[in-house]
Image: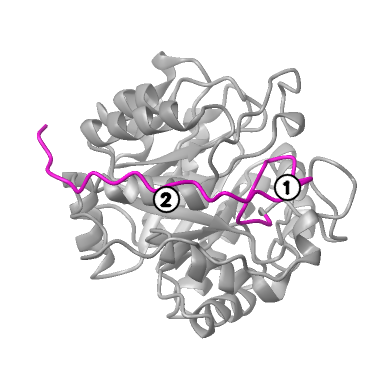
Amino acid sequence: MSVHTQERTPSLPATRIAGCPKSMTYGPCGGVNGDGTCEVDPTPCVFLHRNLPIRWSAEPPAGGPAEVATTAGRELSAIAAKRPLVFTGFPVRALRSDAVGPSAEALTGSTDAVLSGDAGRARVQFPPSYRAALIGATGLRLWMGFNARDRNRTALERELRSLRALGVAGVHCVTGDHTQTGDRPDARPVFDLESTTTLPRAGALGILTSFAESPAAPPLAERGARVAEKQRAGGRMCLTQYAGDAEEVAAFVELCRRAGATAPVLPGVPLVVDRDGARLLASFHAAKLPSGFIDRLFAARDVRAEGIRLAVEYGRSLIETGVVGGVVIAGGARPGGEAAYAADLATVARALGGGS
Protein backbone atom coordinates (compact mmCIF):
# COMPACT_ATOMS: atom_id res chain seq x y z
CA MET A 1 0.00 0.00 0.00
CA SER A 2 1.47 3.32 -1.04
CA VAL A 3 0.78 6.13 1.40
CA HIS A 4 2.02 9.69 1.18
CA THR A 5 2.65 11.26 4.57
CA GLN A 6 4.83 13.96 6.01
CA GLU A 7 8.00 12.23 7.16
CA ARG A 8 8.72 13.74 10.57
CA THR A 9 10.75 12.23 13.38
CA PRO A 10 10.11 14.32 16.51
CA SER A 11 13.14 14.60 18.72
CA LEU A 12 13.24 13.26 22.26
CA PRO A 13 13.38 15.96 24.97
CA ALA A 14 16.77 16.34 26.60
CA THR A 15 15.57 16.10 30.20
CA ARG A 16 14.35 12.95 31.86
CA ILE A 17 13.31 12.95 35.48
CA ALA A 18 15.94 11.33 37.69
CA GLY A 19 14.65 8.44 39.75
CA CYS A 20 11.74 7.38 37.54
CA PRO A 21 12.02 3.61 36.90
CA LYS A 22 10.53 4.17 33.43
CA SER A 23 12.94 7.01 32.55
CA MET A 24 9.97 9.27 31.82
CA THR A 25 9.96 12.95 30.98
CA TYR A 26 6.22 13.58 30.81
CA GLY A 27 5.05 11.68 33.91
CA PRO A 28 3.54 10.69 36.14
CA CYS A 29 2.30 7.49 34.54
CA GLY A 30 -1.02 5.89 35.39
CA GLY A 31 0.52 3.51 37.90
CA VAL A 32 0.78 5.87 40.86
CA ASN A 33 -0.77 4.22 43.92
CA GLY A 34 -3.41 5.97 45.97
CA ASP A 35 -0.84 6.92 48.60
CA GLY A 36 1.39 8.54 45.98
CA THR A 37 3.95 5.74 45.76
CA CYS A 38 5.37 4.28 42.57
CA GLU A 39 3.91 1.04 41.20
CA VAL A 40 7.45 -0.32 40.79
CA ASP A 41 9.18 0.87 43.96
CA PRO A 42 7.31 1.67 47.23
CA THR A 43 8.72 5.19 47.35
CA PRO A 44 6.94 8.47 46.45
CA CYS A 45 6.51 9.06 42.73
CA VAL A 46 9.26 11.47 41.70
CA PHE A 47 6.82 13.58 39.65
CA LEU A 48 4.51 14.48 42.51
CA HIS A 49 6.91 17.11 43.86
CA ARG A 50 7.26 18.97 40.55
CA ASN A 51 5.25 21.54 38.64
CA LEU A 52 2.70 19.53 36.69
CA PRO A 53 1.76 18.89 34.02
CA ILE A 54 5.10 18.92 32.26
CA ARG A 55 4.35 20.66 28.98
CA TRP A 56 4.92 18.99 25.65
CA SER A 57 8.05 20.73 24.40
CA ALA A 58 7.48 20.61 20.65
CA GLU A 59 5.12 22.72 18.58
CA PRO A 60 2.32 20.92 16.74
CA PRO A 61 3.31 20.24 13.11
CA ALA A 62 2.33 22.85 10.56
CA GLY A 63 -0.90 21.88 8.85
CA GLY A 64 -1.96 19.57 11.67
CA PRO A 65 -1.60 15.78 11.78
CA ALA A 66 -0.99 13.79 8.63
CA GLU A 67 -4.03 12.57 6.69
CA VAL A 68 -5.42 9.28 8.02
CA ALA A 69 -3.59 6.63 6.01
CA THR A 70 -5.72 3.51 6.48
CA THR A 71 -9.20 2.55 5.31
CA ALA A 72 -10.09 1.18 8.74
CA GLY A 73 -9.02 4.45 10.36
CA ARG A 74 -11.19 6.48 8.00
CA GLU A 75 -14.15 4.15 8.60
CA LEU A 76 -13.79 4.51 12.36
CA SER A 77 -13.57 8.29 12.07
CA ALA A 78 -16.83 8.28 10.10
CA ILE A 79 -18.57 6.21 12.79
CA ALA A 80 -17.28 8.52 15.53
CA ALA A 81 -18.82 11.49 13.72
CA LYS A 82 -22.25 9.85 14.02
CA ARG A 83 -22.35 8.12 17.42
CA PRO A 84 -20.22 6.97 20.38
CA LEU A 85 -17.65 4.33 19.49
CA VAL A 86 -17.83 0.87 21.02
CA PHE A 87 -14.48 -0.90 21.41
CA THR A 88 -13.87 -4.26 23.04
CA GLY A 89 -10.79 -6.06 24.17
CA PHE A 90 -9.58 -9.02 22.13
CA PRO A 91 -9.11 -12.02 24.44
CA VAL A 92 -6.71 -14.60 23.06
CA ARG A 93 -4.08 -16.91 24.52
CA ALA A 94 -0.60 -15.43 24.09
CA LEU A 95 1.59 -16.98 21.36
CA ARG A 96 -1.31 -19.02 19.95
CA SER A 97 -2.04 -18.01 16.38
CA ASP A 98 -4.67 -20.75 16.12
CA ALA A 99 -6.66 -19.13 18.95
CA VAL A 100 -7.30 -15.88 17.06
CA GLY A 101 -10.06 -17.25 14.82
CA PRO A 102 -12.57 -18.37 17.50
CA SER A 103 -12.38 -15.06 19.39
CA ALA A 104 -12.66 -13.07 16.17
CA GLU A 105 -15.68 -15.09 15.05
CA ALA A 106 -17.41 -14.38 18.36
CA LEU A 107 -16.81 -10.62 18.06
CA THR A 108 -17.58 -10.12 14.38
CA GLY A 109 -20.45 -7.71 13.79
CA SER A 110 -20.70 -6.52 17.38
CA THR A 111 -17.81 -4.11 17.90
CA ASP A 112 -16.47 -1.10 16.02
CA ALA A 113 -12.87 -2.14 16.72
CA VAL A 114 -10.99 -4.54 18.95
CA LEU A 115 -8.18 -3.37 21.22
CA SER A 116 -5.29 -5.83 21.43
CA GLY A 117 -3.13 -4.56 24.26
CA ASP A 118 -0.58 -5.59 26.83
CA ALA A 119 -1.16 -8.27 29.46
CA GLY A 120 0.62 -8.43 32.79
CA ARG A 121 0.10 -12.18 32.96
CA ALA A 122 1.76 -12.76 29.56
CA ARG A 123 4.55 -10.28 28.88
CA VAL A 124 5.93 -12.47 26.09
CA GLN A 125 3.52 -12.00 23.21
CA PHE A 126 3.72 -11.88 19.43
CA PRO A 127 5.01 -8.46 18.30
CA PRO A 128 2.34 -5.87 17.43
CA SER A 129 2.75 -6.19 13.67
CA TYR A 130 2.34 -9.98 13.68
CA ARG A 131 -0.70 -9.76 15.96
CA ALA A 132 -2.08 -7.12 13.59
CA ALA A 133 -1.58 -9.44 10.62
CA LEU A 134 -3.40 -12.29 12.40
CA ILE A 135 -6.32 -10.21 13.67
CA GLY A 136 -6.60 -8.08 10.54
CA ALA A 137 -6.98 -11.22 8.43
CA THR A 138 -10.26 -11.94 10.25
CA GLY A 139 -11.84 -8.73 8.96
CA LEU A 140 -12.10 -7.02 12.35
CA ARG A 141 -10.94 -3.43 12.69
CA LEU A 142 -7.93 -3.42 14.98
CA TRP A 143 -6.83 -0.78 17.46
CA MET A 144 -3.35 -2.02 18.35
CA GLY A 145 -1.85 -1.59 21.80
CA PHE A 146 1.67 -0.22 21.53
CA ASN A 147 3.98 -0.01 24.55
CA ALA A 148 7.46 1.46 24.87
CA ARG A 149 8.73 -0.99 27.48
CA ASP A 150 10.30 -3.64 25.26
CA ARG A 151 11.88 -1.88 22.25
CA ASN A 152 14.09 1.09 21.51
CA ARG A 153 12.92 3.88 19.23
CA THR A 154 14.20 2.39 15.99
CA ALA A 155 12.36 -0.87 16.68
CA LEU A 156 9.22 1.06 17.69
CA GLU A 157 9.32 3.11 14.50
CA ARG A 158 9.75 -0.07 12.47
CA GLU A 159 6.66 -1.54 14.13
CA LEU A 160 4.65 1.63 13.46
CA ARG A 161 5.47 1.52 9.77
CA SER A 162 4.50 -2.13 9.66
CA LEU A 163 1.18 -1.40 11.39
CA ARG A 164 0.42 1.34 8.89
CA ALA A 165 1.16 -1.02 6.00
CA LEU A 166 -1.12 -3.64 7.58
CA GLY A 167 -3.98 -1.14 7.71
CA VAL A 168 -4.74 -0.97 11.43
CA ALA A 169 -7.51 1.41 12.47
CA GLY A 170 -5.24 3.00 15.07
CA VAL A 171 -2.67 2.51 17.79
CA HIS A 172 -2.99 2.92 21.55
CA CYS A 173 0.31 4.49 22.63
CA VAL A 174 1.26 3.73 26.23
CA THR A 175 4.52 3.92 28.12
CA GLY A 176 3.81 0.41 29.39
CA ASP A 177 3.99 -1.43 32.68
CA HIS A 178 7.43 -2.04 34.11
CA THR A 179 8.86 -5.54 33.73
CA GLN A 180 9.03 -5.88 37.52
CA THR A 181 5.22 -5.77 37.73
CA GLY A 182 4.59 -8.62 35.28
CA ASP A 183 5.45 -12.25 34.83
CA ARG A 184 8.99 -11.57 33.52
CA PRO A 185 10.89 -9.54 36.14
CA ASP A 186 14.10 -10.99 34.70
CA ALA A 187 13.69 -8.90 31.52
CA ARG A 188 15.50 -5.57 31.18
CA PRO A 189 13.09 -2.66 30.62
CA VAL A 190 13.87 -0.33 27.70
CA PHE A 191 11.63 2.78 27.85
CA ASP A 192 13.64 4.62 25.19
CA LEU A 193 10.39 6.48 24.45
CA GLU A 194 7.15 6.95 26.38
CA SER A 195 3.54 7.44 25.33
CA THR A 196 3.91 11.20 24.83
CA THR A 197 6.91 10.80 22.52
CA THR A 198 5.43 7.83 20.64
CA LEU A 199 2.21 9.69 19.76
CA PRO A 200 3.78 12.21 17.32
CA ARG A 201 5.68 9.44 15.56
CA ALA A 202 2.46 7.51 14.92
CA GLY A 203 0.57 10.64 13.90
CA ALA A 204 3.28 11.64 11.43
CA LEU A 205 2.66 8.34 9.63
CA GLY A 206 -1.06 8.99 9.30
CA ILE A 207 -2.06 6.50 11.98
CA LEU A 208 -4.94 7.38 14.29
CA THR A 209 -3.76 7.43 17.89
CA SER A 210 -5.07 7.08 21.41
CA PHE A 211 -3.44 7.35 24.78
CA ALA A 212 -4.23 6.24 28.31
CA GLU A 213 -5.08 8.22 31.40
CA SER A 214 -5.93 7.16 34.95
CA PRO A 215 -8.42 9.66 36.39
CA ALA A 216 -8.27 8.10 39.87
CA ALA A 217 -4.45 8.13 40.18
CA PRO A 218 -2.60 10.93 42.00
CA PRO A 219 -2.31 13.78 41.23
CA LEU A 220 -6.04 13.84 40.45
CA ALA A 221 -6.20 17.60 39.82
CA GLU A 222 -3.55 17.43 37.05
CA ARG A 223 -4.87 14.44 35.10
CA GLY A 224 -7.05 16.58 32.83
CA ALA A 225 -4.12 18.83 31.98
CA ARG A 226 -2.05 15.75 31.13
CA VAL A 227 -4.73 14.80 28.61
CA ALA A 228 -4.39 18.24 27.05
CA GLU A 229 -0.60 17.87 26.77
CA LYS A 230 -0.87 14.40 25.23
CA GLN A 231 -3.35 15.80 22.73
CA ARG A 232 -0.84 18.54 21.86
CA ALA A 233 1.73 15.80 21.25
CA GLY A 234 -0.54 14.13 18.68
CA GLY A 235 -3.06 12.06 20.64
CA ARG A 236 -6.50 11.84 19.04
CA MET A 237 -8.47 9.93 21.71
CA CYS A 238 -8.13 9.26 25.44
CA LEU A 239 -8.88 5.74 26.71
CA THR A 240 -9.17 5.73 30.48
CA GLN A 241 -8.61 3.27 33.24
CA TYR A 242 -11.79 2.38 35.15
CA ALA A 243 -12.80 5.68 36.71
CA GLY A 244 -15.77 5.18 39.02
CA ASP A 245 -19.45 6.01 38.53
CA ALA A 246 -20.74 7.77 35.42
CA GLU A 247 -20.92 11.07 37.31
CA GLU A 248 -17.24 10.79 38.21
CA VAL A 249 -16.30 10.07 34.60
CA ALA A 250 -18.32 13.09 33.46
CA ALA A 251 -16.48 15.22 36.03
CA PHE A 252 -13.15 13.99 34.63
CA VAL A 253 -14.22 14.91 31.09
CA GLU A 254 -15.11 18.38 32.35
CA LEU A 255 -11.66 18.60 33.99
CA CYS A 256 -10.10 17.78 30.59
CA ARG A 257 -12.21 20.40 28.82
CA ARG A 258 -11.27 23.10 31.34
CA ALA A 259 -7.61 22.27 30.65
CA GLY A 260 -8.15 22.79 26.93
CA ALA A 261 -8.40 19.16 25.82
CA THR A 262 -10.95 18.42 23.11
CA ALA A 263 -9.99 14.80 22.38
CA PRO A 264 -12.87 12.33 22.83
CA VAL A 265 -12.69 10.38 26.10
CA LEU A 266 -13.56 6.66 25.99
CA PRO A 267 -13.83 5.27 29.52
CA GLY A 268 -13.36 1.62 30.37
CA VAL A 269 -16.35 -0.63 31.02
CA PRO A 270 -15.40 -3.66 33.15
CA LEU A 271 -16.87 -7.01 32.13
CA VAL A 272 -16.43 -9.70 34.77
CA VAL A 273 -17.93 -13.16 34.26
CA ASP A 274 -16.35 -15.10 37.13
CA ARG A 275 -14.91 -14.47 40.57
CA ASP A 276 -11.32 -14.81 39.36
CA GLY A 277 -11.99 -11.95 36.96
CA ALA A 278 -13.40 -9.86 39.80
CA ARG A 279 -10.25 -10.39 41.85
CA LEU A 280 -8.09 -9.49 38.85
CA LEU A 281 -9.87 -6.17 38.28
CA ALA A 282 -9.77 -5.34 41.98
CA SER A 283 -5.96 -5.63 41.83
CA PHE A 284 -5.48 -3.13 38.97
CA HIS A 285 -3.36 -0.06 39.75
CA ALA A 286 -5.34 3.18 39.91
CA ALA A 287 -8.61 1.50 38.89
CA LYS A 288 -11.82 2.78 40.47
CA LEU A 289 -14.72 0.45 39.78
CA PRO A 290 -18.37 1.61 39.88
CA SER A 291 -19.95 1.76 43.34
CA GLY A 292 -20.80 -1.68 44.71
CA PHE A 293 -19.52 -3.45 41.59
CA ILE A 294 -17.46 -6.19 43.25
CA ASP A 295 -19.97 -6.72 46.08
CA ARG A 296 -22.81 -7.24 43.63
CA LEU A 297 -20.77 -9.74 41.63
CA PHE A 298 -19.74 -11.79 44.65
CA ALA A 299 -23.33 -11.79 45.92
CA ALA A 300 -24.78 -12.99 42.62
CA ARG A 301 -25.90 -16.57 42.15
CA ASP A 302 -24.99 -16.39 38.45
CA VAL A 303 -21.82 -14.26 38.24
CA ARG A 304 -21.67 -14.35 34.44
CA ALA A 305 -25.23 -13.12 33.96
CA GLU A 306 -24.80 -10.43 36.60
CA GLY A 307 -21.47 -9.34 35.11
CA ILE A 308 -23.02 -8.89 31.68
CA ARG A 309 -25.98 -7.03 33.15
CA LEU A 310 -23.73 -4.70 35.16
CA ALA A 311 -21.52 -3.96 32.14
CA VAL A 312 -24.52 -3.06 29.98
CA GLU A 313 -26.02 -0.93 32.75
CA TYR A 314 -22.77 0.91 33.39
CA GLY A 315 -21.97 1.36 29.70
CA ARG A 316 -25.37 2.88 29.06
CA SER A 317 -24.98 5.23 32.01
CA LEU A 318 -21.68 6.45 30.56
CA ILE A 319 -23.10 7.01 27.08
CA GLU A 320 -26.16 8.76 28.51
CA THR A 321 -23.94 11.42 30.08
CA GLY A 322 -23.57 12.76 26.56
CA VAL A 323 -19.93 13.74 27.15
CA VAL A 324 -17.98 10.56 26.31
CA GLY A 325 -16.77 9.64 22.85
CA GLY A 326 -17.53 5.96 23.38
CA VAL A 327 -16.59 3.08 25.64
CA VAL A 328 -13.99 0.30 25.82
CA ILE A 329 -15.40 -2.98 27.17
CA ALA A 330 -12.71 -5.24 28.61
CA GLY A 331 -11.64 -7.32 31.58
CA GLY A 332 -9.91 -10.65 32.03
CA ALA A 333 -10.59 -14.08 30.58
CA ARG A 334 -9.84 -17.32 32.36
CA PRO A 335 -7.07 -19.28 30.53
CA GLY A 336 -8.83 -21.50 28.03
CA GLY A 337 -12.02 -19.44 28.18
CA GLU A 338 -11.02 -16.66 25.81
CA ALA A 339 -13.50 -17.46 23.02
CA ALA A 340 -16.39 -17.74 25.47
CA TYR A 341 -15.37 -14.43 27.04
CA ALA A 342 -15.21 -12.86 23.56
CA ALA A 343 -18.83 -13.92 23.06
CA ASP A 344 -19.78 -12.18 26.31
CA LEU A 345 -17.94 -9.05 25.18
CA ALA A 346 -19.95 -9.21 21.96
CA THR A 347 -23.21 -9.40 23.91
CA VAL A 348 -22.39 -6.22 25.82
CA ALA A 349 -21.07 -4.43 22.73
CA ARG A 350 -24.24 -5.12 20.75
CA ALA A 351 -26.38 -3.89 23.63
CA LEU A 352 -24.41 -0.62 23.64
CA GLY A 353 -24.88 -0.06 19.91
CA GLY A 354 -21.59 -1.36 18.53
CA GLY A 355 -20.98 -3.11 15.24
CA SER A 356 -20.95 -1.72 11.74
Q: Residue at x 64, y 47 (%)?
A: 24
Q: In this view, does 241 lie above or below 103?
A: below
Q: In which quarter of the image is the N terminus?
A: top left
Residue 284: assigned label: 1
Percent position of residue 57, x then y: 49, 62
Q: What element carries label 2?
A: helix
Q: Is residue 317 above or below residue 239?
A: below
Disc 1 packing (10 Å; few <14; some 14–19; many ≥20) = few
Task: Give x and y (percent) for residue 178.
Answer: 69, 35
Q: Mark 2 points at which residue?
A: 199
Q: Which of marks 1 and 2 is nearer the N terminus?
A: 2
Image check: 47 left or right of 266? right
- Residue 189 forms part of the magenta stretch: no
Between 328 and 225, the one nearer to me in the picture:
225
At x 49%, y 81%, the residue is 257
Residue 129: x %, y % from top left: 36, 26
* Badge number at residue 21: none
First to last magenta residue range = 1-28
Q: Which of 288 and 303 is in front in this view?
A: 288
**Residue 210: which quarter of the image?**
bottom left
For disc 2, the neighbor class at 10 Å (few under 14, some 14 to 19, many from 20) is many
What is the three-letter code of the residue carrying label 1?
Phe
Q: How is the image coloured?
A: one colour
What amino acid type should be assigned to the residue bearing mark 2?
A: Leu
